[in-house]
Amino acid sequence: MKIRKAGIILKKDFKKPRRIGEEIIHWFADRGVKTVVDQVTKDLDILIILGGDGTLLHIADKASKYEIPVMGINLGGLGFLTAVSAKERFEALELLLQGKMTVEERMLLKTRLLGGPGTDSSPGSYLYALNDVVISKGDVDQIIRLRTWSDQEFITTYRADGLIFSTPTGSTAYNLSSGGPIVQPGLPCILVTPICPFMLESRPVLLPPDVTLVSQLGGKADNVKVIVDGRFTWKMEENSQLEVKTASKPLHLISMPQKGYFEILRNKLNWGGSGNKIPELPL
């Protein structure tokens, strides 16, 4: 990977990302690489994210639009997406310039709300999610009914606190806490997971990536929200329809070559307890 110009995205209002960002700017300058801060433009060869997964989620749509590879340096919490630790940053940057980092394609979802007040149904009205699109009830004492279709085939009417449409990347986010499965990022699919369903047999489903999903309220409900990658986006009305499908361009996510997906899960989710020795594969 030839890198001539790098963008550095800083976690807002925190001193540590700014300090580390200045170090990286000087490191790149010593190697003849130009840098810009908090800008995403199509002439960038790489984006370096200094923060947590939330910081990366906020720029994922622009990065995928311009097909800019993204490397996340975790200065936040769990860091499933920003998988390079702060202490590994210069090792990772050196491997990056040598073309030895792993580049994965992570699918995104695109979504729009049709038929609601003030909504725009034009092709440019889509919003994009790397993790998930969530329909969430606003009132504690109500269960909402969500009629849901896949390519015009009726799936069911979910009676639940809400509904999660997730990518494989987002399977370890809200989907996981709602009882959905963990899906390896390389498996293209869309997960549909009800939130606290009224009927126990209402289970998550995995669907192929080329379907178009539509969900509509099955009756009046107050203050139902649509949340795209953690950001409140629309208020859903009884006659509006939420459309969700796979975006045409993936995000190119860079990770350390020696870190496997399940190693990250073991470290982040403490599978099997911390410090357990990894057994050798039997012959």
Image: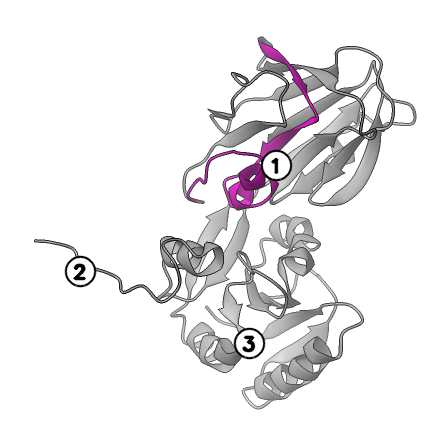
Is residue 97 highlighted in magenta? Answer: no
**Residue at the spot of label 1:** 109
Q: What number is the disc on residue 280?
A: 2
Q: Residue at x 57, y 65 (%)?
A: 72
For label 2, the SS is loop
Q: Residues within 10 Å of mark 3 (few under 14, many from 20)?
A: some
Q: Which residues are magenta?
A: 155-184
Which mark is in front, 2 or 3? 2
Is residue 165 highlighted in magenta? Answer: yes
Q: Earlier in the sequence, mark 1 or mark 2?
A: 1
Q: Furthest residue to the bottom?
A: 30
Q: Earlier in the sequence, mark 1 or mark 3?
A: 3
Q: Position of residue 212 (x, y in %)?
A: 60, 22
Viewer-nearest residue: 77 or 147:
77
Q: Residue at x 69, y 76 (%)?
A: 17
For label 1, the SS is strand
Which mark is in front, 1 or 3? 3
Q: Describe residue 170's horizontal placement relative to residue 227 as left or right.
A: left
* Distance in Å between CA atoms under marks 1 and 3: 29 Å
* Distance in Å between CA atoms under marks 1 and 2: 38 Å
Q: Is residue 148 above or below residue 79?
A: above
Q: Position of residue 52 (x, y in %)?
A: 63, 63
* Distance in Å between CA atoms under marks 2 and 3: 29 Å
| Kind of residue at disc 1 | Leu
**Residue at the spot of label 3:** 86
| Kind of residue at disc 2 | Glu
Q: Residue at x 51, y 16 (%)?
A: 201
| Whether residue 248 can be seen here | no
